[in-house]
Amino acid sequence: MKIRLDDVMQSFSFPFDAVYLYYIPLETVLMFVEGNIFGKAVQGISSLEDAEKRSEEFIRLPEIGSEGRTKVMTGFIDLLPDEQQRNRLKEAALQDGGRGFESALREEKLLMSWYNYREEVYTELAERWCAGKGLELII
């Protein structure tokens, strides 16, 4: 079976914890956050419990959670040669769940470097996950 890279990486990207399920027949991602469902309407699926009852039609996408996202941020920060930038960005990454991190990156003119780094890490995670599940990744 094939799965799109963007669909797998989506489960890493959002700044809140959610459950992502890939609905095989329609090749769509459903996201469940605190009991609410987001994504394309799927007949007979209105809750996570409904999806779990039809588990043969779904693949639960990987999640890294807020702790994983923080590790990716600190991995990027640790690569920076400038100590002042590292300190500023570490502070921003750890405050308010990292909400000020992108603003700090903009101020330090590192936003594109961050996006490139994050995409590289998330792509590697997606590739490893797909290989472990026996899925073919479509880029």
Image (spheres, helix red, strand yellow):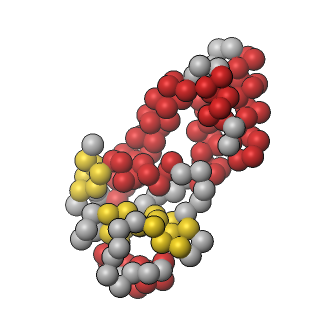
Check the image and report above or below for 72 versus 2: above
Q: Which residue ends up furthest to the top in the rendered image? A: 82
In the image: residue 101, left or right of residue 63: right
Check the image and report above or below for 33 versus 47: above
Q: Which residue shows up at 36% across the image and 53% down it? A: 7
Q: Position of residue 31 (x, y in %)?
A: 46, 65
Check the image and report above or below for 100 versus 28: above
Q: Which residue shows up at 24% across the image and 71% down it? A: 25
Is residue 60 visible in the rendered image? The answer is no
Q: Quadrant of residue 83?
A: top right
- The residue lying toward the viewer, choosing from 44 and 58, is 44
Quarter placement of the C terminus: top left
Quarter placement of the N terminus: bottom left
- The residue lying toward the viewer, choosing from 121 and 25, is 25
Q: Position of residue 98 (x, y in %)?
A: 68, 42
Q: Quadrant of residue 86?
A: top right
Q: Which residue shows up at 70% across the image and 20% down it? A: 85
In the image: residue 60, left or right of residue 15: left
Q: Position of residue 59 (x, y in %)?
A: 37, 67
- The residue lying toward the viewer, choosing from 68 and 28, is 28
